[in-house]
Amino acid sequence: MQRHSSTGPGSSLPVLVGEAEQVSKSFGETAALVDVSLNVRAGECHGLVGRNGAGKSTLVSLLTGLTRPDHGAIRLEGEPAPGLADRGAWLARVACVYQRSMVVPPLTVAENVFLNRPTGRGGQAVNWRRMRAEARELMLEWGFDVDVDQEAGRLTVEQRQIVEIARALSIGARFLILDEPTAALEKAAVERLFERVRRMREGGVGVLYISHHLEEIYEICDRVSVLRDGELVLSGDVSSVSQANLVAAMVGSAPPRRATEIEAVKLRVEPGETRLAVDHLVVFSRAGSVADVSLSVRAGECVGLVGLDGSGSATVADAVVGLMKPRSGAIAINGKPVRAGKVDSTLRRGVGYVPQDRHARGFAPQLGVAENLTLALLDRLARRLGLVAFAERDAIAERQVEKLQIVARSLQQPVSSLSGGNQQKVVVGRALAPDPTALVVVNPTVGVDVASKEALLDALGRARDQGVAVLLVSDDFEDLRVCTRLVVMVRGRIAAEFDRPPWDRQQLIAAVEGLEVAV
Amino acid sequence: MAEGAVERPAAGARPTPRRDPRLVVLNWFRELTLVPVIIVLLIAGAVVNPVFFTPSNLINVAEGGAALGMVVVAESLILLTGKFDISLQGTFGLAALLGAWLIAPKASEGLGTEWNPWIGLVIVLLVGLAVGTFNGFLVIKANFNAFIFTLAMSILLTGLQLGWLGGQTVYNLPEAYIYIGAESWVGVPVSVWITVATFVVAALFLRYHRAGRAMYAIGGNLEAARAAGIQVDRIRIGVFMVASILAAVGGLMQAGRVTAVTAGQGSNLIFGVFAAAVIGGISLDGGRGRMVGALTGVILLSLVTNILTLSNISSTWIDAVDGAIILIALGLAKLIGTERS
């Protein structure tokens, strides 16, 4: 593992730093990858794109030795891949910088760079002076600007990324996988990242660059490969692939009815008064910041807020219900401003909320279906001395169970023992039970079966028709069929608006990926 | 963490500065938060009772702190890796007891086997090793919750101690067995020498040994440590084993000091241990803290105990005052920023 002599840029290495040859991988019944071949040359940046679930992460775990392919072979630096148990050998050849940070906060930058590697004589002692000097030298060599004596916990997202890249380079890896490296970066930081990637490319490092933002692929990559449903559907020089072709490859040819249009909603009610108004909202968040977003939702309207992970669309929803404190801007519900950090008072004002992560915020797993469904209206059910009116509670719960077709043995069955689809129905039912005037819904159909999805979307559609103002945040295009208007967010800003259903899939995808809308 | 902070523009060949001396000073300052408190206590001690500043009393303080200190080192090591072990107090009592029981004559509540005292010493260490291994495997490999599991172990070990002795005290122990608790080198008790050496070795190990740094990495971000190829389970189990052995040695010191093992040795010790470690800056969340800090925590607690004994406070009130002083020290540590969680 001691390969410090070759840490500098410009060292000669095999032409192919990483290679997957006809690899296939299945998890149970699902084929995650089918017969995929892809290689990364030294000194090139290879873009990898594909929608969620296309098999990108599976390919990354094969290339980094976290799993073994069912068929096919992985080669690193021209040699067959080492055994899965030999972590050291993998780390010396390939590294992946994930979105989730892998630095150790209490340790210094230098220590993070040399994590688990000897720096002194004898292999066991830590030579601090040498470690710091080598880390500093490494940073200088690659043009990274991070103080090696800083505590890693105090670094910015960008600096943490640099530390992880530096760690990989110092071990000697010349094959670097960047998994959505720009998701949490601001614009200036993205530029600096590109500068670093170019520098590594010149130094003979091969980069596999995974991104949802196609314009980045055109800016920084030499070649691009597209995965769809576990298959490699396109691979070639970036200069020879047009944006339209790239999008077409990602989307594929769906069944004819859905090829271009997403089922449209029939407008039954004319939109009424404005229920929910967001004015020049600015929010900072690790999960995706919001930079100046204004929108309004009127009664009887369902506005779809569409964006990739990290685009800030979910953050808007969090801010609207008061979970996150905005930097600036105003949020009003029924004309009155929302107070940040007071979720309960927001909800009491007639807002129903379906949170993004149902396991974290959606339900109390050990409580029964009825209790969970009525959690939001406990004060309305409270009688003398604060005792809960159980009969009334069960009646309300029963109504929601019917409306949403929740499948449960009884109203008392713990929600933890329900299927994912039924759990989600309980969460949506909880939001609907108090008869809200506005609904804020985030990814309501993630991980649920087709039948549940229909039931959930129908329920949202009914609420809309009854005059509820619905803000639906989702990146699943199927969800958008209940919407009457779409707002697309890219990097914290509104990139496009569509106000006449039906929606054109191609245009929508192009907008979401941050491309010019190509017609 | 400044989310929106903009990094300085990427500099080309700008030489990176030497290690900022202010940073070094700040780090030490953070570790030595308690020093002013200790100075205040020293002054208070002198005011409370003129006996306080006599050499024999100060040695007495150090001796009292030695046994506690061993367990604090042990607990700190475990805390750094992000776990904890309540049963160290059980090991502290049971290991010393078992050794004593097998070597003491029947007349002084021993079993009557009257084994060689050296075998007794080996047994003390073996008990520590056995308990540590058991705890380590079940907490790390079998994934038992460390709090509830080691709490149960603690109750079990203390119960065994009481049951075996039937509430009696084993006394009249051979010289070799009580040597480290009863003898002195150049006027300072052997136990104090050993504890100080243990602190120094632990501090150097944590700072300069690969495994020591790996412990910080494990406590700081377990998944990152695993991804870096650190053998996280092996190290964490190893730490449990070492810690229990240290606690057993601490128990031996205590036994030597009073030249007997009582059925209650170690009871309620663990609260003081946690208090010393935490006010000394060892984070309960893992990955943060240094041995110097833990040492100041031990000194502080030992001084408090001594001063309270010397003062005229009624013995029934000592615990309350003890608790209040720990709370004040915690508040101070938080103010200065040692305990950030």
Image (cartoon, rainbow, N blue to C red):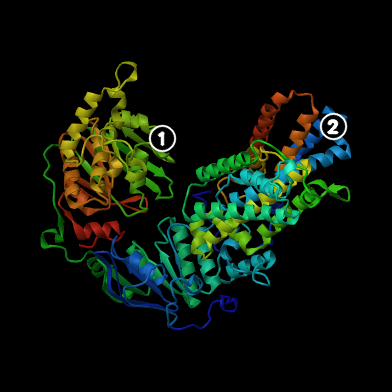
Q: Residue B202: x percent and y percent?
A: 69, 55
Q: Residues within 10 Å of mark 1 (few under 14, many from 20)?
A: some
State the SS at label 2.
Answer: helix
- In the displayed orientation, state which residue is furthest to the top: A384
Q: Nearer the viewer, residue A419 or A255?
A: A419
Residue B35 occupies which quadrant of the picture? top right
The residue sitting at 37% across, 33% down in the picture is A343
The amino acid type, in three-letter code, at marker 2 is: Ala
Q: Residue at x 47, y 64 (%)?
A: A193
Q: Amino acid at mark 1?
A: Ala
Q: Chain of mark 2?
A: B
Q: Which mark is on residue A51? A: none
| CA separation in Å, label 1 and label 2 | 54 Å
Quarter of the image where one finds residue B260: top right
Q: Considering the image in quadrants, where does the C terminus of chain A appear?
A: bottom left
In the depicted structure, whether residue B312 falls above or below residue A64: above
Against A422, is A88 above or below? below
User: Is residue A148 visible in this depiction of the protein?
Assistant: no
Q: Residues within 10 Å of mark 2 (few under 14, many from 20)?
A: some
Q: Position of residue A512 (x, y in %)?
A: 28, 56
Which of A495 and A18 lies nearest the eye of the viewer?
A18
Question: Where residue A375 sits: x, y (%)?
Answer: 30, 32
**What residue did someone put label 2 on?**
B46
Is residue A464 toward the left or the right of residue B325 in the image?
A: left
Horizontally, residue A414 falls left or right of residue A67, namely: left
- Asked if labels 1 and 2 share a chain, the reply is no
- In front: label 1 or label 2: 2
Using the image, name the chain to which the residue with label 1 belongs.
A
Q: Position of residue A286 (x, y in %)?
A: 43, 50
**Residue labelled with disc 1:** A340
Q: Nearer the viewer, residue A213 or A105?
A: A105
